[in-house]
Image: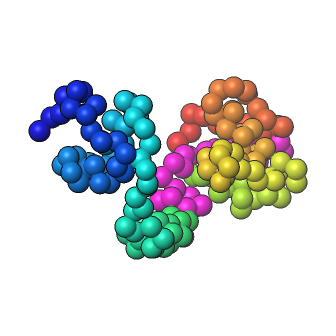
Amino acid sequence: MRMTIDQWRQVDWSKDNKQLAKELGKSHDTVAKKRWLLKAVKADSRATYSNKGKSNPNLSHGAVNQPLATEGAKSSVKSGRFDTNIHAKNWVLVSPDDKTYRATNLHHFVRENPHLFNESDVTWKRKGGKRGTGGEYCNATAGLSNIRGGKTEAWKGWRLIKNEK
C-alpha cells in the first residue's frame, strides 16, 4: 500500500532502515530514500547486512571468466590478429619502390612485414582508456589508414590502389 507523505513523517526514524523496512513492508532502499528526502534524524544504530564480510560466489564469475574470454577472443579467427578478422578490409598497397602488396588486414600486414617500414613507424601503441581499451596502432597503420580515409594521397611514399578488388 502506498504511504502518504504525512504517514512517512510519523515514522519513528530512530530505528534503523532494516527494521523500518520490515515493519512497514517496504524495501530497504525505499526507507533509506525517504529518510534522506525528509531529512530525518539518523538512526540510533545501524544494521549491518547479513552477508557482510562473506564472499559471494555469484559475483566471482567475472574474475574467473574474463581471462578465459580474453584468451578466446585473441585466438578467434574473427576477432584475433588474423587476415580473417571481422573488421579486415582488402588493401592493395604500392611501396615507395613501386612494389605492389595485397593484404586483407592492414594491421596484420604491418605486423608480418615490419622490414618494409622504418623501425620507428612500427612501434605499436595503445589508444583509449586506462586499461588499453580502444585497440592498437602504429605510425604505419595510422598513416596508411589516412590514405584510405581520404585524408592524404600518400604516406612516406606508400600509396593505395583504391579501385582494385
Q: Is residue 123 or residue 143 the one in the foreground?
A: 123
Residue depicted at x 69% and y 45%: 127
Q: How is the image coloured?
A: rainbow
Toward which corner of the image does residue 22 lie, by quadrant?
bottom left
Residue depicted at x 37% and y 67%: 50
Q: Is residue 160 or residue 32 the one in the foreground?
A: 32
Is residue 76 shown to the viewer in this render? no
Give the magenta-colored segment's residue range.
78-100
- Position in image of residue 54 (x %, y %): 45, 73
- Position in image of residue 48 (x %, y %): 42, 61
Q: Is residue 148 magenta?
A: no
Q: Is residue 81 magenta?
A: yes
Left or right: residue 135 versus residue 159 is: left
Residue depicted at x 18% and y 49%: 25
Q: Is residue 5 above or below residue 45?
A: above
Is residue 110 shown to the viewer in this render? yes
Toward which corner of the image does residue 14 lie, by quadrant?
top left
Q: Is residue 134 or residue 65 the one in the foreground?
A: 65
- Position in image of residue 129 (x %, y %): 65, 46
- Position in image of residue 96 (x %, y %): 83, 42
> Please, which residue is most extreme toward the left here?
1
Q: Is residue 71 above or below residue 133?
A: below
Left or right: residue 112 versus residue 68 is: right
- Which quarter of the image is occupied by the N terminus? top left
Is the magenta region chiefly helix, strand or loop? loop
> Please, which residue is most extreme toward the right here?
119
